[in-house]
Amino acid sequence: MAEVERAKGTREVNPEDKLLMNHVVDNLRRIFELYGFLPLETPTLQKFDVLASKYAGGAEILKETFKLNDQGKREIALRYDLTVPLALYIALNPNIKLPFKRYEVGKVFRDGPISSERFREFWQCDVDIIGSSSMLAEAELINLAFKAFKEFDLDVEIKINNREILDAIMKYAGIDSSKIETIILTIDKLDKIHEEGVKKELKEKNLDEDQIERIFNIISIKGSNKDKIIRLKDLIEDNEGIKEIEELIQYCPNVFLDLSLARGLAYYTGTIFEIFSKSGKSAICSGGRYDNMIGNFLGNKQKYPAVGISFGLDRIALLLKKEKKTTVKVYIIPIKTTEQSFKLLNNIRDDGINADIDIMGRNISKNLDYANVLSIPYVIFIGDDEIKLQKYKLRDMKTGKEELLNYQQLINKLK
């Protein structure tokens, strides 16, 4: 019998992990809509020339694009992100009401390096604001991200930089304009190959010692955000990028200015950001401003300012699984008491406790399995006996201990 193998860089998601991923997506969708974003769905298959456009992701991401031909010999490709298809959607609908706030959850594909946390087929959850050049748009997305990760009980750090600052660093170092993109791509590898590796690669790209030293003089600046900005102004001319960073820090003081943060995609024009879990090494969320892409797709000079952020669903779910984190404190299992159980759910939520309820009509055993998979610490059973007694059976999912409590005792226990 021939050996059966999955395609390299892919995986199956077992039912337990899929439940967790669904849980993450459901919570993200709720938060996206809380902030006024509307859902959109774009095609997985795109015209290759759209994804390969000089206005899209750039040469580096093009190397990772899955390309194929349909039966009509037309060149098509699997999308490598959700941003370029969004730009195409706006270009095809130029009369859309602005600002356009949308979110999309979908699979993307990249033929790149693989690891235990990096696959060639993976999910992205994107949130974008089209039509606003205000730093309030960036602040809205960063605050949304803080809200989401607080809901997941994940401790994160948000790093920011600005593409105009990077361009000014290149000018300060005397880098020829034709080399800027490739040099920025090398700087973007600093976390992976460290200072020695970056310097080695810069030498291989024919930078001299003085140019390399000038780059590191800036990207290695330490201290508070304020200290970095003061030092930055001493070394390079004050530009719009520095002003934007200063304004953004006023709105979002908890961000961390990282002058080495580069982001590999060529379409970024202003603010860029990445979000890291403090317990992990990989970015779980990233984004930035891309003001030129949509107008360029339209082939006119009309400005379509745009900024977006992308949540890495697979990595977030993996992190939650490792840390056994859940946003739900208690899960209600109705036993032929749906109406009364729903009232209890609303009361518990009104008291500030994250609660959920079975809406699938599953039996008790399957509901307990569901709560275990999501690491929900408590379960409430509500049957006819509980309704008559006006008490609720609370199970501690870790110890298995059960208690019969009135409402106030229940709330005190859960808090």
Image: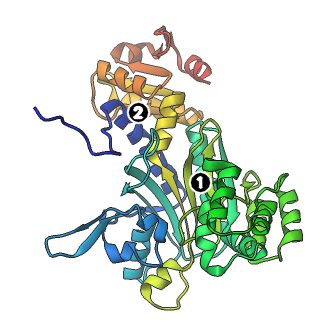
- The answer to whether residue 401 is above or below residue 185 is above
Instruction: Determine the secondary structure under disc 2.
Output: helix
Residue 359 location (% of width, % of height) = 33, 35
Q: Label for residue 244?
A: none
Q: On the rendered structure, is 271 left or right of 57? A: right
Q: Is residue 177 above or below residue 271?
A: below
Residue 161: horizontal and vertical position, in percent?
69, 62
Residue at left offset 84%, top offset 59%? 228
Q: Is residue 403 visible?
A: yes
Res. 144 mark: 1
- The CA distance from mark 1 to mark 2 is 28 Å
Query: Which quadrant of the rendered structure holds the N terminus?
Result: top left
> In screen coordinates, is 336 left or right of 407?
left
Assess disc 1: are there few (<14), some (14-19) or many (≥20) residues with their C-alpha within 10 Å of its C-alpha: some
Residue 365, image x, y percentages:
30, 18
- Asked if residue 137 can be seen in this view, the reply is no
**Mark 1 residue type:** Leu
Which residue is drawn at the image coordinates 48% and 8% (left, top)? 401
Q: Mark 1 or 2, which is nearer the eye?
A: 1
Quadrant location, the C terminus: top right
Residue 220: image quadrant is: bottom right
Of residues 100 and 168, the one nearer the viewer is 168
Q: Residue flagged by tag 2: what amino acid is it?
A: Phe
Nearer to us in this view, 202 or 412: 202
User: Which mark is drawn over residue 342?
Assistant: 2
Which quadrant of the figure has residue 298?
A: bottom left
Counting from the top left corner in percent of width and height, residue 341 is at 40, 28
In the picture, residue 211 is in which quadrant?
bottom right
Vertical arrangement, residue 394 with respect to residue 267, above or below: above
Residue at 44% in and 29% down:
374
